[in-house]
Amino acid sequence: MRKAILSGAVMLCCMLQATAQRSISVNEAVNLALQHNFNIQIAKSNIAIATLNNNIGVAGGLPTVTGTATNQESIVNINQKINSVTGDRDLTRNGAISNNLNAGIAGTMVLYNGYRVITTKKQLEMIQAQSESFFNSQVQNTIAVVMTKYFDVIRQRSYMKTLEQSIEVSKKQLEIIAVKRKIGFANDADYFQAEIDLHSKEQDLQSQKIILEQGRADLFNLLSMPADSSAIFTDSITIENNIKLEEVLNRMNQNPDIIAADQQISINSLAEKQTAALRYPTLRVNSGINYGRSTSNGGQILLNQSYGPYVGLGLSVPIYTGSILKRQQQAAAINTHIARVQKDATILNYQTDLTKTYQMYIHTLDLIATQYAINRLTEQLVNLTLQRFSLSQATILEVRAAQQSFEEAGYKLVNLNYAAKAAEIELKRVAGILAP
């Protein structure tokens, strides 16, 4: 009965531990990053700002209406000389109280200013589209960083498993020497050396655990999760081995950075037109209603009140501005040229990086197939050397050399897989087609 209770308790603890440890796949990691990553949130906010600014009112195409009101109370000294049909007479009064009240609503609207309003509205639309391109670029970059870091954690964990296998070999070697030592076929030096080798491997494993935990902490930071989270990462490194360079280059026009660079050319071209429009006349319509009332208990006019609507046109023509507008237009044209050069440089850099990354991708895929065979051979070599050692046909040095070959082969294999996966991620990112 007690054994059954103990077994049940052990099973319950295992179930609770498994429940507490959340497994996160690479797709889940990417989705978490897209939901919580701070750079993604900032990019979304920039889109919201650009969307708010993309309005005909911001472009100056809607009328502006202003209401004004003033009320002024004064105490004045009046000295007036009045000319009337009965002759001149003087009016003098000290401390007269007067009141002036003025109120009005004024509206103005641009009728023509060299199509500057239309150009500004198009520029605002292009800025909004560019902010969306920047957002897509941030999404692609975030996906690439998260996936690369995720598979780096898998790489470090795989190498740790290789070390664990090597430690098992060292333990078996120590057990064999211990048995031989009891029957007099092994000396203390061999036993001590085997213990030293085992402790050295265990130290290597502890160092690798530190590297793994640091990598996990970096990945949790990308996911906006606490570094001490108990979540585990379960996916293995699988490589898509049918990517073609021509297809990636043809789809490079989907890269959001290149799209944004092209949109910057349009934005600068529109800014050039905006500056050119400043050299054209501006025609405005003005309309409103005014109310005025003035009272005084002294002087010739005791009450003066007026009110009513008004409408009119206003025309302003730039005649001479010290060549400022001309220079501003020339500077805007230079900015457009700079944007074109920057786009060409971006495309060239991406083409160069794609070619280099693809060469590494293809070369690494070729090496992986060979390395799998080497890895199997080193594993067989370790087992065979350990068997020969148990039969006193191999030395400690031969076992150690076989172990070292096994570790190096395992490390190289997982590094090649990681390098190929990182190259695959980068190729898709530059092509603008990276998805979880």
Image (cartoon, rainbow, N blue to C red):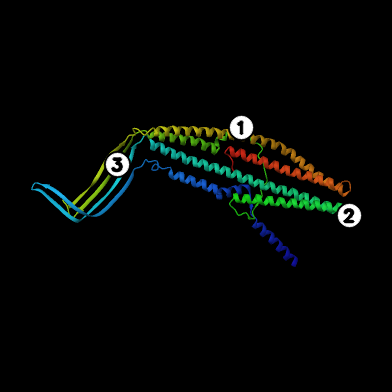
Q: Quadrant of residue 182?
A: bottom right
Pointer 3 or 2: first along the chain: 2
Residue at 32% over, 47% down: 66
Left or right, 168 with respect to 318, comes to: right
Q: Which residue is mark 3?
A: 286
Measured in 3D between alpha carbons, the distance from the residue under mark 3 to the one under mark 1, in whole angstroms, is 61 Å
Measured in 3D between alpha carbons, the distance from the residue under mark 1 to the one under mark 2, in whole angstroms, is 65 Å
Name the residue furthest left.
86
Residue type highlighted by circle 2: Arg
Pointer 1 or 2: first along the chain: 2
Q: Position of residue 199 (x, y in %)?
A: 78, 53
Q: Judge whether 361 appears above or below 97 on screen.
A: above
Residue at 29% over, 41% down: 286
Residue type highlighted by circle 1: Glu
Left or right, 183 with respect to 242, comes to: right
| Count of numbered labels shown in the rendering | 3
Visible residue check, residue 1: no
Left or right, 243 with respect to 339, comes to: right
Measured in 3D between alpha carbons, the distance from the residue under mark 3 to the one under mark 2, in whole angstroms, is 109 Å
Q: Which residue is mark 2?
A: 181
Helix, strand or loop for disc 1: helix
Q: Are marks 3 and 2 in contact (CB under 8 Å)?
A: no
Image quarter in which the N terminus is found: bottom right
Helix, strand or loop for disc 2: helix
Pointer 3 or 1: first along the chain: 1
Q: Position of residue 237 (x, y in %)?
A: 67, 44
Q: Are marks 3 and 1 in contact (CB under 8 Å)?
A: no
Q: Judge whether 71 appears above or below 405 on screen.
A: below
